[in-house]
Amino acid sequence: MTFTIPIENGDAVKIAEAESQRTLYPYVTGTSIVAIKYKDGVLMASDMGGSYGSTLRYKNIERMKAIGKHSLLGASGEISDFQEILRYLDELTLNDNMWDDGNSLGPKEIHNYLTRVMYNRRNKFNPLWNTLVLGGVKNGKSYLGMVSMIGVSFEDDHVATGFGNHLARPILRDEWHADLSFEDGVKLLEKCMRVLLYRDRSAINKLQIAKITEEGVTVSQPYSLKTFWEFSSFHNPTASAEGSW
Amino acid sequence: MTKQHANWSPYDNNGGTCVAIAGSDYCVIAADTRMSTGYSILSRDYSKIHKLADKAVLSSSGFQADVKALQKVLKSRHLIYQHQHNKQMSCPAMAQLLSNTLYFKRFFPYYAFNVLGGLDEEGKGCVFTYDAVGSYERVGYGAQGSGSTLIMPFLDNQLKSPSPLLLPKQDSNTPLSEAEAVDLVKTVFASATERDIYTGDKLEIMILKADGIKTELMDLRKD
């Protein structure tokens, strides 16, 4: 970050540059992540958009990544901070591997680590501007949790970030049940993603669905949802209110 | 160059209510299981009660990330204590530790509203109530959190204990039986749930006695 500062007060230059090292606002952001537990593990959905304020700058961002053998991390918020978190996790999983003791970090451990990282950054007033979703399966047990940028964390059978919390969670509360089949799980996620597509202006119609089971992680190829815009009231929206838009 | 202000707050209120009542040989600690942020519910099944020692159970509402960090600090300090003293911490000792831990962050507080319940060295129930920066006192009953203003006056009415200023010092524990105290707790939470949007979903009740801890779950309104 650069500042133009009047030169009369030379100290102000040094102080301002020192001040500017903290995150103040996000720049390139990803929108919601929606995730559910199902019969064999966890399903997670996200779109591939990266917005620069109101501009849709990037349309090919993968916001879900496999971590180690047992976990899947999805992030909304600042993309560069997500990439930084992936670097932290790379180091964590590398060190875990180097022990070479047959043990590997499970989703619960990764979730705890991420919670500590986010909380500690918040304590230093320099947050990582993300809301993270951590899903995974280890030893047959599924795990799904969420961490916010100030360190609030919890686990549940279904989670969603950002707009997903407002639009997708109510659908999940109504229609989620234990032991969903893969097809039903995907249908449920697509239902949520379609609502988000209609109502979240930063959502784009290019999404991926990731699945994590005991066998590992698979991230689908990007695809788009069918949408319907031919509602009669969309055709002449001002019919009942002349002069409005 | 004016000082730049953060456009985010390091604090959030995740809501919820905690209550504890001390009896002659038991202590009841209860809290709802709703975790919220703003006008959204994050989880309907989040426990706010944590056992710190055999005879000391902490219930905290407020900012969940700070509550979690506070519990970690207390848990690890308790472990060190056990290594050094070869015994568990008593409830009054844990009460002092909690106060000191909170005051340690006097200038960037843990946004946690705590009620500590347990059994004292004589086996009688004890409840300690705190503010966010560690000022505490031993009481016969306590309520903290978003529903505390609704619950406390009712508890005052039902459990009014003698003034702590009287001499000789009178027992502030309730003469109610364990079953009556649990019933009272269920009543106050059902009432608080009606009017406090941050309280609801489920009620978790822990009953601490000399022979162990019992947990009970009760449904509350989900709206």
Image (cartoon, helix red, strand yellow):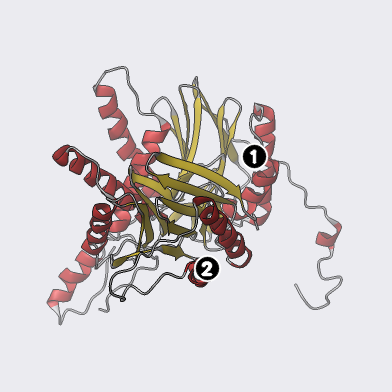
Tags 2 and 1 on a common chain: no
Residue B113: x %, y % from top left: 39, 62
Q: Name which residue type carries label 2.
A: Gln
Q: Which residue is mark 2?
A: B158
Task: Tell whether A211 sits left or right of B126.
Answer: right
User: Residue A174 appears in which quarter of the rendering?
Assistant: top right
Q: Which numbered dot is residue A189? A: 1
Tell me if residue A108 comes above or below residue B217 in the rendering. Answer: above
Residue for point 39% across, 29% down: A106
Query: Label 1 marks which chain's residue?
Result: A
- Number of numbered markers: 2
- What is the C-alpha distance between the residues marked 2 and 1? 50 Å
Q: Height in image: A5 above or below B147?
A: below
Instruction: Tell me which amino acid carries mark 1.
Output: Leu
Residue B163 showing in the rendered view: yes
Q: Nearer the viewer, residue A181 or A31?
A: A181
- SS for callout 2: helix
Q: Please tell me whether residue A18 is drawn above or below residue B213 in the rendered image.
A: below
Residue B141 drawn above or below residue A72? below
Q: Nearer the viewer, residue A58 or A188?
A: A188
